[in-house]
Amino acid sequence: MEGFHLRLGHARSLMMKARRVVAFSGAGISTESGLTDFRSPGGIWDRYRMVTFQEFCASHEARVEYWRMRRELIPELLKARPNKAHLALAEMEKRGKLAAVITQNIDGLHQEAGSRNVIELHGTNRTASCLQCYKSWPIGVIQQRLEKEGLDPGCDRCGGRIKPDTVSFGQSMPESALNSAFDLARRCDLMLMIGSSLEVQPAASVPLVAQQNGARLIFINRTPTAYDSLATVRFNEPAGEIMEQLAPIPR
């Protein structure tokens, strides 16, 4: 692998020459904001069983199990703030250098940083909705109900079940978001892949589609992935450190 400064120079050159840049982000971009990577040792999936969408809909006990995990997770998400990587991507979009961010994350930090064109493949944890009448609430309101009323909140309008606006295991991904992501991948000439293990399909195929359609890939990831050989340049340094070098944030 090239030395750090050679890789950085190479990546900067790719950025300068690119006409249409798209970013693809995973949980690793948000760990520098204090959020735990769900899949890391000691993460959420180590401590809680995955409750499928079908179980959530069918079983009170499964909903209680699901909301117990969410009750622990929500305060961490509400406390988190965008880090240098989020801010750098927002600045790139502001300068007209970044077409969009495609994210697997549910934390809403890209939008909080100022990014406008954000494709959320797995939904958002910032809101929750009734599965029956679609009434929506800020997730902080639901957190208050979990703490006061118990772990299976019902809709105060129709009595239906409330669920965060995230894509659960066994639940279909939003087709429009997925179509937009693959369309962006096919039309970009440079993709920044930041902080994803690239293990969850079909989202993990987005960088592959970009590469197959002629785009160069810059990987900024602390751990190896099965797609590393596709990258033109790879960094295993912190995302904030690299993005601050590639897209300086005005002081």
Image (cartoon, helix red, strand yellow):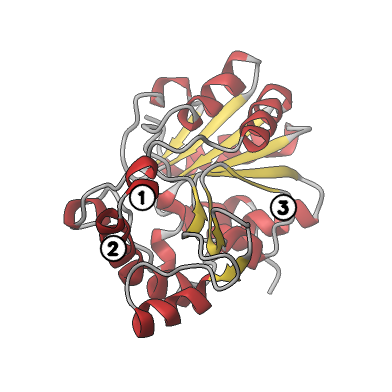
Residue 20 is left or right of residue 160, and the answer is right
The Cα atoms of the two marked residues, 1 and 2, are separated by 9 Å
Q: Quadrant of the N terminus?
A: top left
- Which numbered tag is attached to residue 91? none
Q: Residue furthest right?
A: 96
Q: Residue at x 66, y 29 (%)?
A: 179
For residue 225, what is the image quadrant? Answer: top left
On the image, numbered disc 3 is attached to which residue? 92
On the image, numbered disc 2 is attached to which residue? 64
Amino acid under disc 3:
Met
Q: Residue at x 54, y 27 (%)?
A: 207
The Cα atoms of the two marked residues, 3 and 2, are separated by 42 Å
The location of residue 220, given as percent across then percent down, is: 46, 42
Describe the element under mark 1 as helix, strand or loop.
Answer: helix
- Which numbered tag is attached to residue 56? 1
Describe the element under mark 3 as helix, strand or loop.
Answer: helix
The location of residue 190, given as percent across then percent down, is: 65, 31
The location of residue 93, given as percent across then percent down, is: 75, 52
